[in-house]
């Protein structure tokens, strides 16, 4: 009886692993497809000193982007505190975006 219970538990855990993996993969496919057609939300953050453009996303809803954007901006300011990174512009866009997600503009003298 104990071996049968163990087999059921192993099968249940294998099923849970499969469903979890399938859910993550399905979510990634949804994000890729919606991004490809321009239905995802992105934040475009431009800084000066250094002159860098960051793309943050993709998100399926504007609300979820705004919830996570403050954490991104906080991490960005913490990382670049010594470089005196100043925020120039922040835009919320519904668009399609591909790599590169960090663009460093070089100065032309």
Image: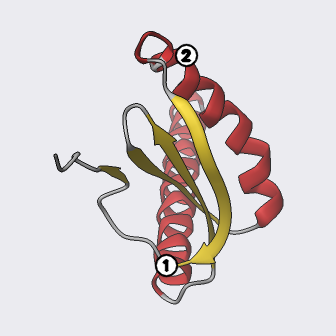
Q: Is residue 43 above or below residue 27?
A: above
Q: Secondary structure at mark 1?
A: loop
In the picture, the disc for residue 48 is: none
Task: Quadrant for the N terminus, please.
Answer: top right
Q: Position of residue 43 (x, y in %)?
A: 61, 57
Q: Residue at x 44, y 72 (%)?
A: 97
Q: Is residue 60 above or below residue 12?
A: below
Q: Position of residue 65 (x, y in %)?
A: 72, 54
Q: Residue furthest right?
A: 63
Q: Quick one: 17 or 3, which is closer to the camera? A: 17
Taking 94 as reference, is 107 left or right? Answer: left
The CA span between labels 1 and 2 is 28 Å
Q: Residue at x 65, y 25 (%)?
A: 74
Q: Residue furthest left?
A: 109
Crowding around mark 1 (Cα neighbors within 10 Å: few <14, some 14 to 19, many 20+) is: some
Q: Quick one: 109 or 107, which is closer to the camera? A: 109
- Residue identifier under label 2: 78
Give the color scheme: rainbow, by chain, secondary structure or one colour.
secondary structure
Q: Quick one: 24 or 13, which is closer to the camera? A: 24
Q: Position of residue 106 (x, y in %)?
A: 22, 47
Whichever of labels 1 and 2 marks the residue nearer the N terminus, that label is 2
Crowding around mark 2 (Cα neighbors within 10 Å: few <14, some 14 to 19, many 20+) is: few
Q: Residue at x 50, y 14 (%)?
A: 81
Q: Residue at x 18, y 50 (%)?
A: 108
- Residue identifier under label 1: 96
Is label 1 or label 2 in front? Answer: 2
Q: Secondary structure at mark 2?
A: helix
């Amino acid at each position: 009886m104990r071996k049968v219970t163990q087999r059921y538990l192993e099968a249940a855990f294998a099923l849970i692993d499969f469903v979890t993996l399938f859910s993550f993969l399905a979510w990634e496919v949804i994000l890729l497809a919606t991004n490809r057609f321009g239905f995802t939300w992105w934040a475009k953050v431009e800084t000066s000193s250094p002159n860098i453009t960051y793309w943050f996303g993709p998100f399926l809803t504007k609300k979820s982007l705004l919830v996570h954007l403050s954490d991104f901006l906080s991490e960005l300011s913490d990382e670049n505190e010594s470089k005196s990174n100043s925020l120039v512009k922040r835009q919320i866009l519904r668009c399609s975006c591909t790599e590169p997600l960090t663009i460093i503009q070089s100065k032309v003298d």
